[in-house]
Amino acid sequence: MHKPYLIDGLKFDMRIYCLIYGVDPLRVFVFREGLARFATEEYVGPYRNNLDNLYMHLTNYAINKYSENFEPNEDSGDDDTGHKRSVTAIFKYIEENEPESGLTVAKLWDMIDDIAVKTLVSAQPQLCHSFRSLQPDDIENSMCFEVLGLDIFLDDKIKPWLIETNSLASFATDSPLDKKVKLDLMYETIAMLNLNAKRKKKAKKIKTE
């Protein structure tokens, strides 16, 4: 994408988390927070003499954290500065600074939801086949779950594009903001799984009958 949407002159991507909690039927939940990872040098469109500048063109945290320009997050409450920010801060920035686009936080999340659903619907038949082959007795469609990480770019028209789907999303907490976002994600996931002694007892009873 040679014309990305920029903030502070920098290219960035967003890690969006999705919970798959059932595949037959497919149940998908999109976590209403995420992390924006920024490049550490101001973006210039790609040409022959700058293609090897990883700090300009790549948004990977694992690369940019070694840049001398990298500004780490040191306070989870300060989520709109530095080279790793919250998705909430990004959407608020767009809503406030791009009024002519007509985009609101709600509309931006609707666009992300649409990407998540279409991505996972495309894989649902294979997921369903594999799951039913391994867990034919799961009458609740809730025996297994997975948290996926979707990597999203915004183009210069503020249209989101899926770049990658990660089945092994990183849960490392290298900063206060990382810790806050990922702990909240885990809390919401466990709450939605509704794990309790009553459900465990019911599952054991069904298995023995």
Image (cartoon, rainbow, N blue to C red):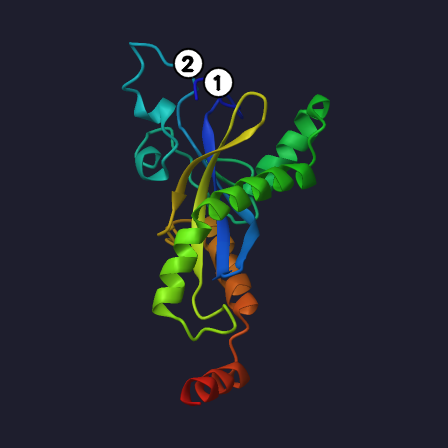
Q: Nearer the viewer, residue 182 or 104?
A: 104
* Residue hosting label 2: 45
Q: Earlier in the sequence, mark 2 or mark 1?
A: 1
Q: Residues within 10 Å of mark 2 (few under 14, many from 20)?
A: few
Residue 2, by quadrant, is top left
Question: Residue at image x 37%, y 53%?
Answer: 172
Q: Position of residue 180 (x, y in %)?
A: 50, 55
Dot 1 falls on a residue whose secondary structure is loop
* Residue hosting label 1: 3
Discs 2, 1 touching: Cβ within 8 Å: yes
Q: Residues within 10 Å of mark 1 (few under 14, many from 20)?
A: some
Dot 2 falls on a residue whose secondary structure is loop
Q: Amino acid at mark 2?
A: Gly
Question: Residue at image x 42%, y 49%?
Answer: 175
Question: Residue at image x 43%, y 58%?
Answer: 128
How far separated are the C-alphas under marks 2 and 1?
7 Å
Q: Nearer the viewer, residue 38 or 190?
A: 190
Q: Quadrant of the C terminus?
A: bottom left
